[in-house]
Image (spheres, rainbow, N blue to C red):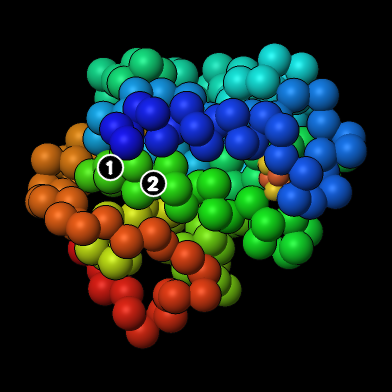
Amino acid sequence: MSATEELQKVAHEVSVCTLCTLHHSRKLAVPGEGPANADIIFIGEGPGFHENEQGRPFVGAAGKFLDELLAKINLKRSDVFIGNVVKCRPPGNRDPLPDELGSCSGYLERQITAINPKVIVTLGRFSLAHFVPNAKIGEIHGQAMRIKGRLVVAMYHPAAGLHQRSLMGTIEQDFRLLPELISKAGPTPEQPEPVSVEKNEPKQLSLF
Ligand code: SF4
């Protein structure tokens, strides 16, 4: 099965998924979108109001800011894959619960395996926790880590910059590191392994 076919299969399964209770309150699931050969995957937390209405990731104010950040490093939304750790909107935009994150993580891992990107950018603490449990985003944002052969870069969620304007400069600075990180990323794993919370321990990490 090609990467494109696998992404389409994941998107279909997500659209009818009932693995966790979030399916009760969703209008549209948001599997994520972008090319199957993207060099970068951006992973946010979960759909918000507008994403739930449209079935697309990052289409609200945070999405507009993400587009601006991408433009500053000469990237377009259509160049990258954008998804979330949970594919259905938590009611009232509450934090996703551990069982919801656990139920949904398999879809994200399949997307990562299919795309086999050079760089994974985590946006916010829930996305970071998928790869590095218990890490503090305030301490490791802008840093690159090797996890199972993949380059993972932790960044603040764009929404954090909208809520706390003093973070905007930091987020922009972290984004400006991406072109160099991509150029230095090296080969992706030949036989990509899904990255899962259970499989990763902090001791396995090394700063890039
Ligand atoms: S959040 Fe994920 S696991 Fe839960 S119903 Fe939606 S697609 Fe399924």
Kindly check if marks 1 and 2 are in contact, taking CB atoms under 8 A apart as contact. yes
Residue at the image point whose x is 74% and y is 24% from the top: 28
Residue at the image point whose x is 49% and y is 42% from the top: 43
Quadrant of the rendered structure where residue 74 is?
Answer: top left
From the image, tell me which residue sits under label 2: 112
Residue at the image point whose x is 28% and y is 25% from the top: 73
- Neighbor class of circle 1 (other Cα within 10 Å; few <14, some 14-19, many 20+) is many
- Residue 151: tell me if it is visible: yes
Quadrant of the rendered structure where residue 178 is?
Answer: top left
174 or 41: nearer the eye? 41
In the image, ligand 1 is in what quadrant? top right
Q: Secondary structure at mark 1?
A: loop
Q: Name the outermost residue toward the bottom.
A: 203
Q: Which mark is residue 117?
A: 1
Query: In the figure, 175 relative to 184: above or below?
Result: above
129 or 187: nearer the eye? 187
Query: In the figure, 68 relative to 122: above or below?
Result: above
Kind of residue at badge 2: Ile
User: Disc 1 versus disc 2: distance between alpha carbons?
Assistant: 7 Å
Q: Position of residue 57 (x, y in %)?
A: 59, 26
Residue at the image point whose x is 37% and y is 16% from the top: 78
